Amino acid sequence: MEEPPRRSSTDEFTFALGIDVGKTALELALCNGEKIVARTTVSNDADGHDTLVSWVEDRGGGPEKTCVCMEASGDFEKAIARRLYEEDYRVSVVNPRRIKGYASSQLQRTKTDSADAALIARFGRREDPRPWEPPSAAESRLQELTRARQALQKEKTRTLWSSG
């Protein structure tokens, strides 16, 4: 059976969810247009991810009504991005430099997790970032091998410099 195509434009959604990703917590801001309608913080673990999905649905959102945007943050975003993708949300994982540039263009100087989540939600709504898809098994393995090779090269260089 063929899967329905994922939505491509954020204009089709009622809500935009911005997630400021941290190692242990996810700061959430749910926007309806330009207005922040709800904010909360959940843990960045399986229980927190369940809470996030329920929280969005309790506020009238869901995969058909909500686009999600978050910054790439050293792999801390991978589990929640995958979970939301599996729940059929349109998820975008964005380079933090793009968000920083957007914040500068909006003259935003407030730097709190809550303000960042709201900024990320507005960015996701206005800038229509590319939808994220999880890497294939082959891509994941290639990333692992590349990182292992880089670590070995770094160790080799360190060893050569310390013995020379």
Image (cartoon, rainbow, N blue to C red):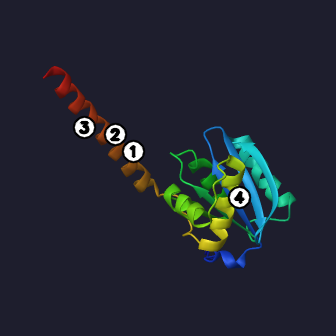
Image vertical order of residue 157 relative to residue 103, above or below? above
Image quarter hosting the C terminus: top left
- Which residue sits at x=61%, y=55%? 81
Image quarter of residue 34: bottom right
- Say which label, 2 or 4, has the lower sequence index: 4
Q: What amino acid is at disc 1? A: Glu
Q: At numbered mark 1, what does the secondary structure look like: helix, strand or loop?
A: helix
Q: What amino acid is at disc 4? A: Ala
- Say which label, 4 or 3, has the lower sequence index: 4
Residue under label 1, please give it.
144
- Say which label, 1 or 4, has the lower sequence index: 4
Mark pair 4, 3: CA separation: 41 Å
Residue under label 4, please give it.
118
Name the residue nearer the viewer: 159 or 5. 159
- Count neighbours of disc 3 (C-alpha within 10 A) and say few if under 14, some if 14 to 19, many if 20 or more: few
Mark pair 2, 1: CA separation: 6 Å
Q: Which residue is most to the top?
A: 163
Image quarter of residue 13: bottom right
Q: What amino acid is at disc 2? A: Ala
Image vertical order of residue 13 relative to residue 100, above or below? below
- Say which of marks 1 and 4 sits in front: 4
Residue 148 has which mark?
Answer: 2
Residue 153 has which mark?
Answer: 3
Q: At numbered mark 2, what does the secondary structure look like: helix, strand or loop?
A: helix
Residue 164 has which mark?
Answer: none
Q: Confirm whether residue 148 shows in the render.
A: yes
Please provide percent x and percent y for residue 96: 52, 55
